[in-house]
């Protein structure tokens, strides 16, 4: 009788230990996923900061160019409209969980990048503008911002990759599905960016 009680107690102790180990592992895994998701959000906020910096610089650049390039209204209008589309987008933290909204955000930002590229090409026709200190300072800031955007997008991609691997890898995927954690979207290359641009002199 004592032996059977000891066996039952031993089994109960083993089961309790197994449950405690499983619960501890589950809590630890959940906390790692939360930490990783917060890393994604932090990386995203840095991307947004750089986009905001560019958004704020554009009106100054357009005004500086306007005085020199009055006949280039179409290009200036394109930049203004692209900036307006970016400004109208409501960017909330939920955008990271909605691939379609994320794609729309990226499309608007790519449109502004494209419009700014056209504007900088147009300015090549205006030697006085290219030597203007205000324009040169704005151009340098804008180029620096584009570089910062590229760096922050790369960091964001690395952080998203780490998070996505974590929520997809078994057995952590079990905890991720219980906690409602979903994969995050990556930035995609702009259509046609895989082809080298034609350069004509």
Image (cartoon, rainbow, N blue to C red):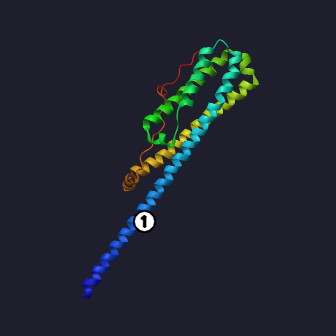
Horizontal and vertical percent position of residue 141: 68, 32
Farthest residue, direction bottom:
2
| Residue 167 visible to an observer of this rendering | yes
Among the 4 quarters of the image, the one containing residue 74 = top right
Horizontal and vertical percent position of residue 82: 56, 25
| Residue 201 visible to an observer of this rendering | no
Q: Residues within 10 Å of mark 1 (few under 14, many from 20)?
A: few
Which type of secondary structure does the marked residue at label 1 adopt? helix
**Left or right of 87 on screen, residue 21:** left
Q: Is residue 151 above or below residue 129?
A: below
Q: Is residue 112 above or below residue 35?
A: above
Q: Mark 1 sits on what residue?
A: 24
Picture quarter with the C terminus: top right
Rendered residue at 46%/54% (across/down): 33
Q: Is residue 1 above or below residue 181?
A: below
Rendered residue at 57%/36% (across/down): 150
Rendered residue at 28%/81% (across/down): 7
Horizontal and vertical percent position of residue 200: 57, 16
Picture quarter with the N terminus: bottom left
């Amino acid at each position: 009788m004592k032996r059977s009680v000891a066996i039952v107690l031993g089994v109960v102790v083993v089961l309790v230990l197994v449950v405690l180990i499983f619960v501890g592992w589950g809590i630890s895994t959940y906390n790692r996923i939360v930490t990783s998701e917060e890393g994604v959000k932090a990386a995203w906020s840095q991307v947004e900061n750089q986009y905001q910096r560019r958004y704020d610089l554009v009106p100054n650049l357009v005004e500086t160019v306007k005085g020199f390039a009055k006949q280039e209204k179409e290009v200036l209008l394109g930049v203004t409209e692209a900036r307006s589309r970016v400004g109208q987008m409501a960017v909330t933290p939920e955008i990271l969980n909605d691939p379609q909204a994320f794609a729309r955000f990226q499309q608007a930002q790519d449109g502004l990048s494209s419009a700014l590229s056209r504007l900088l090409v147009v300015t090549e026709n205006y030697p006085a503008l290219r030597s203007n200190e205000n324009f040169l300072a704005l151009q340098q800031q804008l180029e620096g911002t584009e570089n910062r955007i590229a760096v922050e997008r790369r960091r964001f991609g690395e952080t998203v990759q780490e998070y996505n691997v974590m929520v997809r890898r078994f057995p952590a995927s079990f905890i991720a599905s219980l906690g409602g954690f979903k994969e995050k979207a990556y930035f995609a290359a702009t259509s046609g960016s895989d082809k080298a641009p034609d350069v004509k002199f």
